[in-house]
Amino acid sequence: EPEVTQTPSHQVTQMGQEVILRCVPISNHLYFYWYRQILGQKVEFLVSFYNNEISEKSEIFDDQFSVERPDGSNFTLKIRSTKLEDSAMYFCASSVRGRGSPLHFGNGTRLTVT
Amino acid sequence: QKEVEQNSGPLSVPEGAIASLNCTYSDRGSQSFFWYRQYSGKSPELIMSIYSNGDKEDGRFTAQLNKASQYVSLLIRDSQPSDSATYLCAVVPSSNYKLTFGKGTLLTVNP
């Protein structure tokens, strides 16, 4: 069964550094998402992306965050200057269609900011 | 008012029993509802989607939706220890495309 793949599985970085989290969505999916989950808390929406542009973003997704689809397969999340509170599990997801279509999640990247 | 609410549990059931998980949501216009399973340290895994009032069965799982009462439930028949996980209810609100999750209910199935 096709799956969403994310790299790296674990990233440790120092406060103030830039990180790029990478994702390869399922090949025939058209909608891409990033979610995060702080330890012990719920899964939170960050951003959705369709047709090479952001379709929606949450209040968490401030100017420190950006997303890009640099080629036909990868989807990336960049955090420009990491803070301690950015430490979380980051999940990439994709869906065939938009609203109402089930999201399929990757295995996640655990980001630890020290 | 929280958008998606679930009892955090833990819900403990013996092996072979029926586990019943409940979820309420605040946006009356919501149309799409999902149940995900999340093992500790892992990603959410889709179990069921439901869009219409009533029941939807898939193997040992049954999702139930009641839009008038704004609740969704998940029944797991013949519960197995491998079903022990956190079950996440997720709803797409009427006003946007953001799949919104509840905090999840921790289910423990005891052998």
Image (cartoon, rainbow, N blue to C red):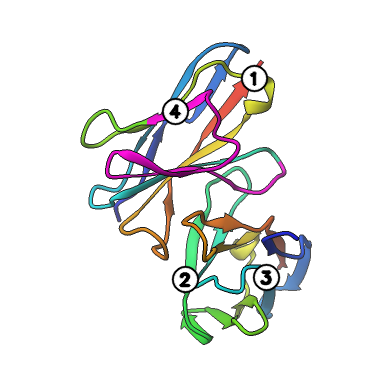
Query: Does the image show residue A107?
Result: no
Measured from the top left, where is residue B106 in percent x and y? 71, 59
Q: Residue at x 37, y 35 (%)?
A: A23
Q: Chain of mark 2?
A: B
Marks 2 and 4 belong to one chain = no
Within 10 Å of disc 3 (Cα), the crowding (few <14, some 14-19, many 20+) is: many
B103 within the magenta span: no
Q: Magenta residues, as a range?
A: A40-67
Q: In what element is the residue under mark 1? A: loop
Q: Earlier in the sequence, mark 3 or mark 2?
A: 3
Q: Chain of mark 3?
A: B
Comparing labels 2 and 4, the label whose residue is closer to the camera: 4
Q: What whole-number distance in Å separates the C-alpha atoms at marks 3 and 4?
A: 33 Å
Q: What whole-number distance in Å separates the C-alpha atoms at marks 1 and 2?
A: 36 Å
- In the foreground, A101 or B63: A101
Q: What kind of residue is marked 1?
A: Lys
Q: Residue at x 54, y 63 (%)?
A: B93
Name the disc covering residue A83, or none.
1
* Residue assigned mark 2: B49
* Residue assigned mark 4: A66
Comparing labels 3 and 4, the label whose residue is closer to the camera: 4
Q: What whole-number distance in Å separates the C-alpha atoms at marks 3 and 2?
A: 14 Å
Q: What kind of residue is marked 4?
A: Ser
Q: In what element is the residue under mark 2? A: strand
Q: What kind of residue is marked 3?
A: Cys
- In the foreground, B14 or A46: A46
Q: What whole-number distance in Å separates the C-alpha atoms at marks 4 and 1?
A: 15 Å
Measured from the top left, where is residue B3 in percent x and y? 67, 61
